[in-house]
Image (tube, helix red, strand yellow):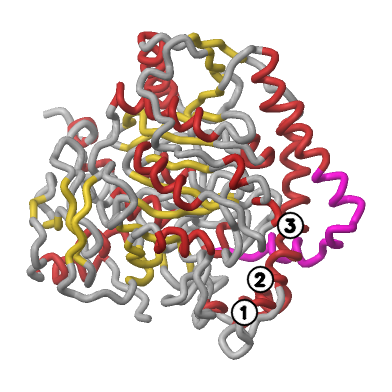
Amino acid sequence: MRFNRMGLGALALAASVALGGCIVIEAPDRDMVWAEASPAWTGDRAGEPDRSEAHLAGNTPAQVATNSVLAWGRHDPDAVVLWASGSGISGMPVLLKDNIETADMPTTAGSLALVDNAPGRDAPLVARLREAGAVILGKTNLSEWANIRSSNSTSGWSAVGGLTRNPHALDRNTCGSSSGSGAAVAAGLAPAAIGTETDGSITCPAAINGIVGFKPTVGLVSRTHIVPISHSQDTAGPMTLTVEDAAIVLTVIAGSDPLDPATVEADARKVDYRAALDAGSLRGTRIGVMRWPSGYNAATLAVFETNLQVLRDAGAVLVDITEAPSDEGAMGAAELTVLLTELKVDLNAYLASTRPDQVRTRTLADVIAFNEAEPRELALFGQELFLLAEQTGGLDDPAYIEARATSLRLAGAEGIDKLLREHRVVALIAPTTGPAWTTDVVNGDHYGGAVSTMPAIAGYPHLTVPMGFVRGLPVGMSFIGGQWEDARILSLGYAFEQLTQARRSPTFARTVDVMDETAPLLAPVH
């Protein structure tokens, strides 16, 4: 399988290549020519007809610019798949984050240590998609090892795939770790992708790239044959252009898996999530507004306030919640102990399941040694979290057992459950995060607020839906609910989406500085 290593320098050449069956349009800044479509998918641009055609071969300018797809699957280059948004799963083009195994492509987690990892097996969620008629297009780039290697990483970068860029402004970050999945869907390379989340790795890149992202209840979707971090918090979930399509995908991938004990209740709990969507679900519904999270800039909060009025006008009863329900510092410290301990155990188990002739790193310790010997791996940032994980004492360590109990209690019973009960609300909302920051390979990431940690630790559903823009960069609204309340959260987000229709296609601007609303302000007054 050929991995895409094309950079922006190849853009002019790629743009000049005739794209069979695809419409070519000129970008607003007139600097670049973009395909409206991709080898993966054509259509459903905001405000335009949503009839779609999948052209299953080759790279396009959108892919070259965002560097979001690592590998395209083997398809007939002349094959065309017709699909329309909302029409169902059959024929839907879907990309997969490259920590999810497929029988026909390598699974690298972005690491050169796994570049030959091709055990020839579909993850159960992939098998479900294939059986339902989805078209698996390829693998997306990601923050290497799902962003658990370093606390000073640059999201969207992996040693295998390089840096994924935000299609709304190419010098801006895509967040992580499902960076390529978010950027690819936003760029029009596919209407849907599967991401994975341990804490924020679906919802943050979805919001920052201006699409829908849904982290389901942990245990609703199988994690078998997915490169792991934490069996307590890991889950896969859909990243799509619309809430309806997210519901369609979730209905297919949800279900029990005998190889994943966490999913024992999934078959009994899953419903037809698309059928459960109700555009009128906001009316009369009590929703808690999380006012205490910090880190958001004033512009993001202004967009949020505007959308709160939309919710009120739709009949929602909004309840301000001004204080955190529990000690967030203690919760975060306990979470880190859990993640590092489970990383060593779970990754060692995964590596042991791979083929020794393909993957020579059989343990986390082997991966650490590999990274130290491979200059590209540690050129931009280190592996201090890997080193800490290697020192952990296993699942029987009293420190781990106490940390898991503490984090789960503070996020669940004394966190989300407490808020829902005491304020008599069925969901919580807040800005998902701020707008995308400028990618900084010197200092690493700098986030602008987040609300992902409580639902991540508790294992509860978390949906982000586009709510508007800040200086041309998208921001999203988070909807968070109780365990197994996935259908309700999707329905509330769907109702909000129908009222706002805030998503819009990216412009692939070189930088925010050249956008119409900003460029005049940066020029001198004559």
How much space separates mark 2 and mark 3, taking CA atoms? 15 Å
- The secondary element bearing badge 1 is classed as loop
Q: Is residue 382 visible?
A: yes
| Residue closest to the eye, 82 or 500 | 82
| Residue indicated by mark 1 | 354
Q: Nearer the viewer, mark 2 or mark 3?
A: 2
Do residues under tags 1 and 2 come within 8 Å of each other at their CB atoms?
Answer: yes
Task: Rate crowding at label 3 as few (under 14), some (14 to 19) or many (20 or more) other CA atoms within 10 Å.
Answer: many
Q: Residue at x 50, y 79 (%)?
A: 120
| Residue indicated by mark 3 | 340
Give the left or right position of residue 342, taking residue 268 as reference. Answer: right
Upstream in the sequence, badge 1 or badge 3? 3
| Residue indicated by mark 2 | 350
Task: Rate crowding at label 1 as few (under 14), some (14 to 19) or many (20 or more) other CA atoms within 10 Å.
Answer: some
Q: Position of residue 464 (x, y in %)?
A: 45, 35
- Write down the region rendered in magenta: 381-404
Upstream in the sequence, badge 2 or badge 3? 3
- Residue most toward the bottom? 357
Q: Position of residue 204 (x, y in %)?
A: 48, 43
Question: Where the N terminus falls, by quadrant?
Answer: bottom left
How much space separates mark 1 and mark 2, taking CA atoms? 7 Å
Task: Rate crowding at label 2 as few (under 14), some (14 to 19) or many (20 or more) other CA atoms within 10 Å.
Answer: some
**Quadrant of residue 60 within the rendered picture:** bottom left
